[in-house]
Amino acid sequence: MEGGGRVSWMKYGPVVSLIVVLLAVWFRSPQNEGLDDRLDTVLSSLLRAERKVGVNNVARPKVAVGFGGCVDLIVDGISLLNKIGLLHTDQPLHHNYIENEVQLAQSFAYFFAPGAAAERFVLNDTLFSELIEASRDLPGNRWAVGGNAPVMAGRMATEGCDVLLGGSFSSDFTDVLSQHITVAGNIVEEPDIHLILEYSSGAKWGHYTSRRANRYIIHSDDHNPYLDSMDDFAEKLKDYNPDLLVVGGLQMMDNFPFQSGEREALFSRLADLLSSSSPQIGVHFEMASFVEESIMEDLLHYVIPHADSLGMNEQELPNLLSLLKGSNITVLSDPNPRVATVLDQMREVYRILNQRYKDANAESGADGVKVKPLTRLHVHTLAFQAMIVTRGSQWKNTMSATAKASLTANRHVCGSNDIDPSKARLIMDDSFSVSRQEGSQRIPLQETRPVSCWDEEDYEICVAPVLVCTEVYQTAGGGDNISAAGLVLQI
């Protein structure tokens, strides 16, 4: 009897399965069907907005990007911690740098539960080496080209630009770069390795559960903190005549054990390089995870005054604003902020930095001043993209650039150029307030025109929803890809 039952099931199983599928389609919830239709409409509308502007592949835009680079070793963070026997801690704590396993557990827990991105320097070489060795044979690990500058350079080359990349790499590293990327810098035998601990939304570690997918990055760099490609980069830059100069990777200097005066000297040389570039060339600075107050002060003194454009995420925006207002660094902020909150913070950063520019101009008098006004601010969050662009500035196509940034977020995180709506969801509200001030206008999310743009004071604001990837391939490098893609359409 048992055998006969199995034969009957095997004989009619495919038919039964087909009936189940047909019934599922027939009785599919109208609500789910409506959500599917909505995602399809938003996607097609974003793609249409992106396609309104193309990159001239005949006269490819020229971009110079510095500094540094590394090899990323990407692993499942929880699997690695379990493998090395690192138990969860009951004391989530922020540490500026990591010296031992206890601090690693505390720091990871601090950022893991809210699902906030973080990057920390490991002062203990032995600990870092042990973590790398444990990761090498971890199932599912991947090696990839890493570092802000190479990742942004790679995206810009893919999107139709020719790129001068400043960094010191191994020959193996340069061999895998796009043919449209020219490297300026030294050849090194052993590249710096960054260990990327990825985790998914709802991942569990002890009694902690992550609120969203993200990554915790640790490194112990030897080359990147010294910006040792800067001289060669500056020399090649003279004849390169780029349309855009991009600076990133400076977080490698955060909490690095420099000798007295070394970091200030490096920043001074970088400021000279930025100020010597043609005023017609746009300069973009990509923020990152900075926790040392003194390096943030250095950025405000040596780098940000020379940048027309800034890019950052939802953690880095309140961090910068807090420092600009004279408060302490904000290490951890809401990983899923509301649109109104982000826009208010962006307006304030824009206002404060441009007031500083005006004050510097007034103080310099007839001697002139090398600092630049901030004319572009791009903030990328999990749920949406937001840009502020000064009207009449060199930055163009803001609406299309915001749409492209949104689409790139999904493409990178899902690991596919083709966006599948069945692997995405909208988490931005159906309507958003343009400010937290009482009585502020609310803007509905229109599926057929999902990028909302409007004018305020001397600038335009654009906001676009992100089709959030639900089957995460990789979060690391997301911000760099998003920022780079948005810039490509605006130069």
Image (cartoon, rainbow, N blue to C red):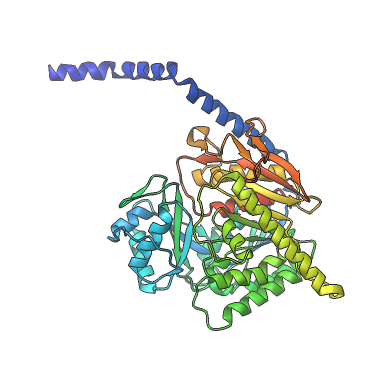
In terms of depth relative to the viewer, which is nearer, 103 or 350? 350
Residue closest to the far left: 1
User: Most extreme residue toward the right, as rendered?
Assistant: 366
Who is closer to the viewer here, 184 or 440? 440
- Is 37 placed left or right of 282 in the picture? left
Does 130 appear above or below 7?
Answer: below
Query: As rendered, which of 175 and 147 lies closer to the eye?
Result: 147
Of residue 403 and residue 361, the one placed in the foreground of this image is 361
- What count of labels does the image hold? 0
In which quarter of the view is residue 165 placed? Answer: bottom right
Q: Quick check: 277 left or right of 83? A: right
| x 41%, y 54%: residue | 112
Q: Is residue 96 visible?
A: yes
**Dividing the picture into quarters, in which one does residue 84 lie?**
bottom left
Residue at (87% x, 74% y) in the render: 366
Q: Position of residue 155 (x, y in %)?
A: 60, 52
Check the image and name the residue furthest to the front: 438
Q: Quadrant of the N terminus?
A: top left
Q: Residue furthest bottom?
A: 260
Does residue 179 appear in this view? no
Could you say where residue 289 lies in the image, as x and y percent from the top left? 53, 62
Q: Is 80 above or below relative to 253?
A: above
Q: Residue 273 at x, y = what percent?
A: 70, 72
- With 448 as the anchor, is 466 left or right in this view? left
Q: Is 456 left, or right, of 223 in this rendering?
A: right
Q: Position of residue 22 (x, y in %)?
A: 40, 17
Examine the image and state in which quarter residue 44 appears: top right
